[in-house]
Amino acid sequence: MTEKQAVKSTDDHWLVRPETIRKLWIGFAIVLALLAAADFLVHKHDYVGPDGWFGFYWVYGFGACVAMVVFAKVLGVLIKRPDGYYDHE
């Protein structure tokens, strides 16, 4: 590795460094584990039936997020304009 590459790798933004990304993944995994453990400690009042199941809100939230992303992708394909659409030449 040249000196210029070594300087460049240390000057990268802290969020793109591999060690920072690894620490963030570990931190997110710990938070997820703590939230999963908290699901055992919280008394749930189920109103519909499945909302009393263990992990229901995780699945519901993840499914809603996936549905929004898929809907946005489909909507983008449907209303996309050609590259030169706004050019008045």
Image (cartoon, rainbow, N blue to C red):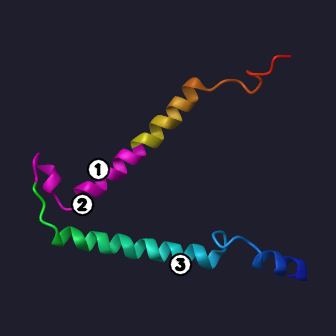
65 above or below 22? above
Q: Quadrant of residue 40?
A: bottom left
Q: Which residues are magenta?
A: 46-66
Query: Element type at marker 3?
Result: helix
Numbered tag placed on residue 30 in the rendering: none
Q: Mark 1 and mark 2: span between their CA atoms?
A: 9 Å
Indicate yes or no whether the magenta region holds residue 50: yes
Neighbours of disc 2 within 10 Å: few (<14), some (14-19), many (20+)? few
Q: Is residue 26 left or right of residue 51?
A: right
Which residue lies under the disc numbered 1?
A: 60
Q: Given the image, on which type of amino acid does mark 2 rest?
A: Gly
Q: Given the image, on which type of amino acid does mark 1 rest?
A: Tyr
Query: Element type at marker 1?
Result: helix
Q: Given the image, on which type of amino acid does mark 3 rest?
A: Lys
Q: Quadrant of residue 9?
A: bottom right
Please name the residue shown 50% across and 36% down the image: 72
Numbered tag placed on residue 55 in the rendering: 2
Quadrant of image for the N terminus: bottom right
Q: Earlier in the sequence, mark 2 or mark 3?
A: 3
Q: Nearer the viewer, mark 2 or mark 3?
A: 3
| Rendering coords of residue 62 (x, y %) | 36, 52
Q: Is residue 2 left or right of residue 80?
A: right
| Rendering coords of residue 18 (x, y %) | 64, 75
